[in-house]
Image: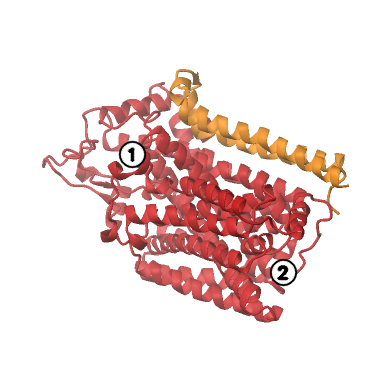
Chain colours: A orange, B red
Amino acid sequence: MKDKAEAYWKANVSLILKLLAIWFVVPFLGGIVFVDTLNQFSLGGYPLGFWIAQQGSIYMFVVLIFYYAKKMSDLDDEFAVGGE
Amino acid sequence: MALQTLTYIVVGLTFALYIGIAFWARAGSTKDFYVAGGGVHPISNGMATAADWMSAASFISMAGLIGFSYQGYGGSVFLLGWTGGYVLLAMCLAPYLRKFGKFTVPEFIGDRYYSKAARIVAVICLIIASVTYVIGQMKGIGVAFSRFLETTYETGLTTGMVIVFIYAVLGGMKGITYTQIAQYVVLIFAYTIPAIFISLSLTGNPIPQLGLGSTLLSDGTYVLDKLNQVVTELGFAEYTTSTRGSTLNMFVYTMSLMIGTAGLPHVIIRFFTVPSVKDARKSAGWALVFIAILYTTAPAVAGMARLNLMSTIEPTPGNYLAYDERPQWFKNWEKTGLLEYQDKNGDGLIQYSADKAVNEMVKVDNDILVLANPEIAGLPNWVIALVAAGGLAAALSTAAGLLLAISSAISHDLLKGVFRPDISEKGELNASRVAMAFTVLLAGYLGFNPPDFAAGTVALAFGLAASSIFPALMLGIFYKRMNTAGAIAGMLSGIGVTLFYVFQHKGFMFVQSTAFLGDMSPNWFLGIEPNAFGAVGALVNLIVAVTVCKLTAEPPQEIQELVDYVRSPHGEGTAVSH
């Protein structure tokens, strides 16, 4: 029982770390630190870095949360720790 | 129909709706009052969270800040910061706090750190952060009411206070949740409809998010290229590349707003209201979907409104608008003092320039942009009336959510948790209503006499939440070894550092004459502006907490079991135990 709970928590934390790495890299590196480099490319009428900072990151945040919710729901079932 | 009559009707109807809902969903028990009975659907909860979260600052000010003060790209800090925090909430806080399954944030901190002192410190942080934030909302309510009901600021503020008080007190969390859903619908229509019209008229593309990246119908250049060209010709920095201070400042600013978002108690308590842990994770995603609709529209509103404003003042390069021929919206906003013209060279024309010596648009307040935008673009009166109702909905819903967070901290955490554990459920409910009444009066009083409460207070609210509450919650969940001494030392040092930095630049309690370092960038630590300092405070909190914790005893066995319990959704209660 205790091992199972530990394995579940480990899987949860490793998922969070992976997703938080993306959460950090895209807006902070893509939208701020390396924005000038990325602005050399364009997406329609948007400079790419500017688009990441004002639009793209927000769409990505939404996807990250739903992906996390889905993956965790699978983990709940796998380890049979779901609610009720 | 005349604009004034139409505005009365639209605002009146939406208010009747909110009060009707508050009455219909009034709270019968403390559980209804604090967590809406614990049975709110994740999509409904997401919508209510979005309305709760998007205040007058998001609705009225943000597009103007992006378009004008922060010069385009610099405004990205708000867009990134105020949305990215939801990722932290969804993964690091919401599911575990829902599993914990009690009413308030200080309650979690008190139980996790097995200490009344920790709970009291959390209550103090919460109250300071929420009260400073609610004063800003009260001021927004006062300004919006007085502008649209054409009364004095004082009458507008009083009207607003009465309305907030009625439904917050009557309904509690249950009433607020359902009222906020209605308010979300009103505010999102009010924001997107004018944006769609404007995008359509400028680019032919009805979707503002795509319109900002499209070409102009008038001359076929891209909107952003045109903006860059127009603003640089007048001597402003390029719209798509001008940073806010340094790259480091933008980085820290964004991080502060993200952590602050995840640490603001009125947002966190919303995740106590859903039926299960699974729903708490999803609900954060839905909240962000509803928020993203406004936040991805805002940059388009900012860019297009700036272009519209500039081409009104200077239709073709070097050909300025004559002051006598200024449009009606210009005159309307001149009356409020938020738009000011000064004919410096006496030629009767309006010269708008980045050069302060030549610039004749001496004042263009950020806050008028969203409200004036439909008028500038020549949209029909019903759209303008709708925007008025939307701005009020945004301010009211946030004020109500904050009041609830404050009153539950006082009645549940201080009264029941510390001073009168034997209080009856009814007594607690009444105490909470009294606390709410006092908070409305206090916030109203400070709203009548704002001691320089502007952007500085909002910065402090975020900085405080970021530097105190968020790290304590995170460590409580992810670091089993964290103990009472570490948590308290961390919270106090985090807030302390942030308060000290903000006060030395903005004045003690924002009284400007006491700002001994002055709000000047040469005095900023590594060039970080006071508004952005919360992330540094959070880092200090983290370092102090971990160091103190290592030097003191491990938390007892039952606390380590509590952490295990919170980490797994297994055995979650379907309802909240009291």
Mark 1: few/some/many CA within 10 Å (<14, 14-19, 20+)? some
Q: Nearer the viewer, residue A54 or B387?
A: A54
Residue behind mark 1: B309
Answer left or right for B232 relative to B101.
left
For this rendering, which residue is in front, B289 or B544? B544
Query: Picture quarter containing residue B267?
Result: bottom right
Residue B387 spot, x, y in % from top left: 47, 52
- The amino acid beneath tag 2 is Lys
Quarter holding the C terminus of chain B is bottom right
Q: Secondary structure at mark 2?
A: helix
Q: Residue A82, relative to residue B440: is it above or below?
A: above
The picture places residue A58, in percent across and down from the top left corner, at 57, 36
Q: Nearer the viewer, residue B158 or B329?
A: B158
> Is circle 2 on the same chain as circle 1?
yes
Q: Which residue: 45% across, 20% down?
A: A37
In the rendered image, residue B502, in percent from the top left (x then y), is placed at: 38, 53
**Residue placed under numbered mark 2 in the picture:** B31
Q: Going by the image, does B503 lie left or right of B538?
A: left
Q: Nearer the viewer, residue B462 or B363?
A: B462
Name which residue type carries label 1: Leu
Residue pushed farthest top? A40
Callout 1: chain: B
Residue B424 in view (yes/no)? yes
Residue B132 on image: x %, y %:
45, 61
Q: Is residue B212 visible?
A: no
Label ID, residue B209 = none
Mark 2 belongs to chain: B
Q: CA distance from mark 2 to mark 1?
A: 50 Å
